[in-house]
Each structure stands twice: as C-alpha cells, then as structure tokens.
C-alpha cells in the first residue's frame, strides 16, 4: 500500500514514516515550505527523509 505522509521536518513524523515502511508499506513524504527561509537553511532536511 502506498501512503502519503505529511512531514513536519521534526523527528516524530520521520519516525512515524519509518515505522510504516518497516511494516511493509511504501511512504511518500510531503512537506510544505511556507516560510521565506533561504535554501541554505533547509539543505539538510532532504537527507533525513530520502
């Protein structure tokens, strides 16, 4: 089953998504960047959730 997960950028949503993957499902993470921060501020977030 493919599941879409809202990713907040924090640990809780990443762990929840990992547990769903461990249960045998495919997870697609979605994150909405609503702030005006520069790309340099968010460069590390992709490594957590790929």
Image (cartoon, rainbow, N blue to C red):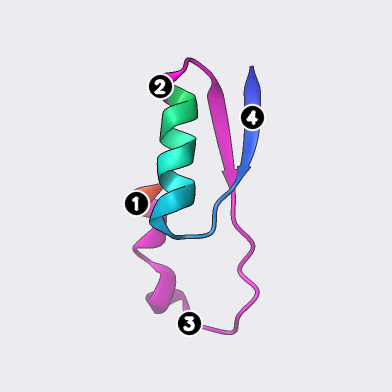
At a point 39% along the width and 54% down the height, the residue shown is 11
Residue 25 bears which disc, if any?
A: none
Magenta residues, start to end: 22-46
Callout 3 secondary element: loop
Quadrant of the rendered image containing residue 31: bottom right
Cβ–Cβ under 8 Å for marks 2 and 3: no
Callout 4 secondary element: strand
Residue 47 bears which disc, if any?
A: 1
- Looking at marks 3 and 4 on the same chain, the residue that comes earlier in the sequence is marked by 4
Q: Residue 26 colored magenta? A: yes
Q: Within 10 angstroms of label 4, few (less than 14), some, or many (20 or more) residues?
A: few
User: Can you tell which of label 3 and label 4 is closer to the viewer?
Assistant: 4
Q: Residue 9 colored magenta? A: no
- Looking at marks 3 and 1 on the same chain, the residue that comes earlier in the sequence is marked by 3
Q: Give the Cα distance between marks 2 and 3.
A: 33 Å
Q: Position of residue 1 (x, y in %)?
A: 64, 16
Where does label 4 land, which residue?
A: 3
Callout 2 secondary element: helix
Where does label 3 land, which residue?
A: 38
Where does label 2 land, which residue?
A: 22
Q: Can residue 50 be seen at all in this image of the molecule?
A: no
Q: Is residue 4 above or below residue 2?
A: below
Q: Is residue 21 above or below residue 41?
A: above
Foreground pick, 28 / 16? 16
């Amino acid at each position: 089953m493919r599941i879409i997960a809202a990713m907040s950028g924090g640990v809780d949503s990443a762990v929840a998504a990992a547990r769903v993957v461990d249960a045998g499902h495919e997870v697609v993470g979605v994150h909405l960047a609503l702030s005006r921060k520069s790309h340099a501020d968010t460069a590390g977030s992709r490594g957590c959730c790929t």
